[in-house]
Amino acid sequence: MTSEARPIRVLAVDDDPEGLFALEQLLLLRGYEVITAASGTETLHKARTESPDLILLDVVMPEPNGYEVAKILKGDPELRYVPIVLLTGKDELEDIIRGLDQGADDYICKPYNSHELLARIHATVRMRALYGELRDAKRENRRLQARMGEEFSFANIIGHSPAMRSLYDMMSKVIETDVPVLITGESGTGKELVATALHVNGPRKDKPFVVQNCSAFNENLLESELFGHVKGSFTGATRDKQGLFEVADGGTFFLDELGEMSPALQVKLLRVLQDGTFMPVGGVKQKQVNVRVIAATNRNLEEMVRAGTFREDLYYRLNVVNLRLPPLRERQGDIPLLVEFFLGKFTGGSGRGRKEIDPEAMAALEGYTWPGNIRQLENEMQRAHVMSGKESLITRLSLSPAVAENTAISPHLAAAADGKLKDVLESVERDMILSALKRCDGNKSEAARQLGISRSNLIAKAQSFGIE
């Protein structure tokens, strides 16, 4: 029936005790988890407290009746995503239409055939997965909209390396335009951050900013998400649905993981880019929108064009401006800035509780290749914060083994490769003494113990290096 960790939870509603008991037993025998209610008021309470996956809702019952309950549930920001099947003794078309208009997803007439009822439940459970994706997408879009209220500028994209300065220059040239932008780069390089910055600093900043990951749905569901559908266009399409292109009208639509889009949908996307028109699934009337499209991918679209898996005309239509985000290994000079930012994020900003990082740990971070890019570095700093416990200084011991044990241990070795061994050793020795004294709050006895030398030797070395 389902591969989920727990069985599907059904809220069964009927004011007839015998009918409710029979329905409950039927569902239990088929492996469903069952919650029951006998009135409209009880239904609303249990819908809010028991988190059902599906509601079988009787129409004729004490106030509020099933129609009113369906309307209330579908008007709730969270409960609206719970599918509702009406159980009605009225088979007149007018009554059925009334129930569907109130938001019900399906109906079945009493007395119902148990096989038909179970088939309807099974079909509605499949619809539940689509509701879940829609709910998550809307939550994500609300989160992104909330970020619009923040002071958002290029300053939120961290890095002063030549590669990043080149990126800022390109962004400043396209920010006021409506031309499509293709953002390319490896996973974890911050493509969504760049897309968001282009929107909130541009002329459409007061209009919607909609995000859709093209790998999140199969082809049919993605088409419905992007372009909407009309009632009756496929099983489960009980009402017209607005697509995300229509939601984004006047604003910006960020299409992430564009390389995962099927050739059939590429054709529809090309039409939107050419003249702003599209056809909803099952529709006969075109819709017109004014949307700026920003797309992103970590795949090589040129190779996909040559392989015939990505349309050449769409590639050139999107690739008016290509913003390539450099991987972190190409901008290692930005690592200290990023580390500083993430330490502030995880350890209390610039106030009390903020942690520092010692030179050897920073050297390990700078020497690592970061296959997961900025996202991996952020996770690494969060781990270091946790593993360092109450210590105010993060050392190599707090880093993950893959980072701590990389071969590029110290920048002094690379910087002084052609110098004298004595100079390199003195530089490393000085940094280790500074780190130990900082870690021990200036306590020379404890610092000497950790370094494995005598207190007098530590004092002598510190004086020779000009360390007070």
Image (cartoon, rainbow, N blue to C red):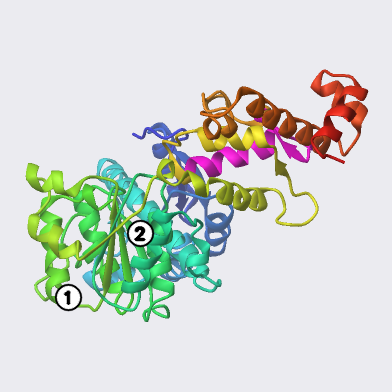
Q: Which residues are magenta?
A: 375-396
Q: Position of residue 258 (x, y in %)?
A: 24, 53
User: Is disc 2 in contact with disc 1, using a CB cutoff of under 8 Å?
Assistant: no
Task: Count neighbours of disc 2 (C-alpha within 10 A) and say few if under 14, some if 14 to 19, many if 20 or more.
Answer: many
Residue 67 quadrant: bottom left
What is the spatial separation of the Cα atoms under label 2 and label 1, in whole angstroms?
A: 39 Å
From the viewer's perspective, is 279 left or right of 224? Answer: left
Say what amino acid the circle numbered 2 marks. Leu
Q: Amino acid at mark 1?
A: Gly
Residue 193: image tag? none
Residue holding disc 1: 276
> Circle 1: is it few (<14), some (14-19), or many (20+) Cα within 10 Å?
some
Position of 226 relative to 450 (above/below): below
Foreground: 310 or 265?
310
Q: Which mark is residue 86?
A: 2
Q: Is residue 345 magenta?
A: no
Q: Is residue 103 in sight in this rendering? A: no
Q: Is label 1 in a helix, a strand or a loop?
A: loop
Query: Would residue 434 appear left or right of 240 to someone viewing this image?
Result: right
Q: Position of residue 130 (x, y in %)?
A: 33, 52
Relative image position of residue 423 (x, y in whole percent): 65, 29
The residue depicted at 72 percent of the width and 28 percent of the height is: 429
Q: Is residue 82 left or right of residue 313?
A: right
Secondary structure type for disc 2: strand
Marks counted in the figure total: 2
- Confirm whether the magenta stretch covers residue 387: yes
Q: Return the residue nearer the eye: 460 or 311.
A: 460
